[in-house]
Image (cartoon, rainbow, N blue to C red):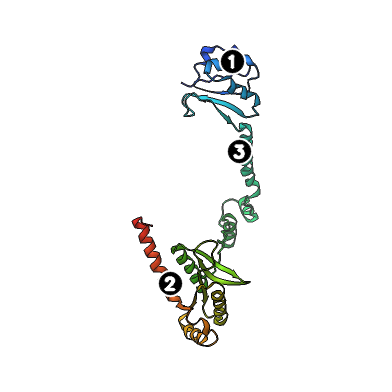
């Protein structure tokens, strides 16, 4: 059995026995002290809470319930949307949908002319025209062209991840006197790079070695030149000549070895994580 009690005037004049039968109630603004006193005594609500109703704006309520709110007999403040506004929105959408019959209806003069003559067969051209009007045009999905990642960027990304697995601070395009180093690893935030990598795949080996030499002279870093297998010979010739000063310092690393190191490091890290010893 469902019952409801709505009081829009002096609630104090209502029978308190009737009020006590309510299991959930909404209290709006109560400007009169006596009304607040009756509600306070009937529903065991502190006067201080009821005085807050004097500050209520439109749509604000004090709600209390034994069951509905899940908080037994504890009053809470709520705001309810205006149901009339929600109805207007709904009816507005419905009217717009009905207007589509006027704006999206299919009209064919051929069909109109034939209909006036009663049921009869129509030609293939007329049939195709009608079908084209009835069947909406299917838009082709937009194909987003995904740019392929270059081998240079792939190796840089792997070097960055290897550094993270080593628990080092890693950076890409690290600034050095206005130039940029491909990848650096640092031991602590404020330290200079401990490891410097230049990745040159079919690029300017001379320029790359020049940057590595400067990093070694500036920071005494461990320096690495990552190259494709076919460029190893050319790099060794440069180290034997122009860059002989860092011949014993720079390490030549082939691209495939970086890939293999990344694979092994990742597997080892994942295995440690599986065992819970990280």
What separation in Å lies between label 1 and label 3 (alpha carbons)? Answer: 41 Å
Q: Earlier in the sequence, mark 2 or mark 1?
A: 1
Eye-nearest disc, 2 or 3: 2
Tag 1–tag 3 contact (CB < 8 Å): no
First in sequence: mark 1 vs mark 3: 1
In the image shown, does 107 or 250 lie closer to the viewer? 250
Disc 2 or 3, which lies upstream in sequence? 3
Camera-nearest label, 1 or 3: 1
Q: Which residue is mark 1?
A: 37
User: Where is 96 relative to 66, above or below?
Assistant: below
* Residue drawn at 52 percent across, 83 percent down: 245
Residue 150 visible from this viewpoint:
no
Q: Is residue 81 visible?
A: yes
Q: Can you name the residue that lies furthest to the left here?
A: 275
Residue 90 is marked as 3
In the rendered image, residue 219, in percent from the top left (x then y), is placed at: 55, 71
Instruction: Identify which residue, 32 or 229, lies in the foreground.
Output: 229
Q: Secondary structure at mark 3?
A: helix
**Dot 2, how many residues are within 10 Å of its Cα: few (below 14), some (14-19), or many (20+)?**
some
Q: Dot 1: what SS? A: helix
Residue 215 locus on image (x, y percent): 55, 74
State left or right for residue 249 relative to residue 133.
Answer: left
Which one is nearer the viewer's eye here, 158 or 209?
A: 209
Q: What's the mark number on residue 259?
A: 2
Quarter of the image for residue 87 reads: top right
Q: Residue 252: image x %, image y %?
A: 46, 79
Q: Residue at x 52, y 75 (%)?
A: 199
Q: Residue at x 64, y 44 (%)?
A: 99
- The span from disc 2 to disc 1 (Cα, nearest Å) is 79 Å
Quadrant location of the C terminus in the rendered image = bottom left
Q: Position of residue 25 (x, y in %)?
A: 54, 23
């Amino acid at each position: 059995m469902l019952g409801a009690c709505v009081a829009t005037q002096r609630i104090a004049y209502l029978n308190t026995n009737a009020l006590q039968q309510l299991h959930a109630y909404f209290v709006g603004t109560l400007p009169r002290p006596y009304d607040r006193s009756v509600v306070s005594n009937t529903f065991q609500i502190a006067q201080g809470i009821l005085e807050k109703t004097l500050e209520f704006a439109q749509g604000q309520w004090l709600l209390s319930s034994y069951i509905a709110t899940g908080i037994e007999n504890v009053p809470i403040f709520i705001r309810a949307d205006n149901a009339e506004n929600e109805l207007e929105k709904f009816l507005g959408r419905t009217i717009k949908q009905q207007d589509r019959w006027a704006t999206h209806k299919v009209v064919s003069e051929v069909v109109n002319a034939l209909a006036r003559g009663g049921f009869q067969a129509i030609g293939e051209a007329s049939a195709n025209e009608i079908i084209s009007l009835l069947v909406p045009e299917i838009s082709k999905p937009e194909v987003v062209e995904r740019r392929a990642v270059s081998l240079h960027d792939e190796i840089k990304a792997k070097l960055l991840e290897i550094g993270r697995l080593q628990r080092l601070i890693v950076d890409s395009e690290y600034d050095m006197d206005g130039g940029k180093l491909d990848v650096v690893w640092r031991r602590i935030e404020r330290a200079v790079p401990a490891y410097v990598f230049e990745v040159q795949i079919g690029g300017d080996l001379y320029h790359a070695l020049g940057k590595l030499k400067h990093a070694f002279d500036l920071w005494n870093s461990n320096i690495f030149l990552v190259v494709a297998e076919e460029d190893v010979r050319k790099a060794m010739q440069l180290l034997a000549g122009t860059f002989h000063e860092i011949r014993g310092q720079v390490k030549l690393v082939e691209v495939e070895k970086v890939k293999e190191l990344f694979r092994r490091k990742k597997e080892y890290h994942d295995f440690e994580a599986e065992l819970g010893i990280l």
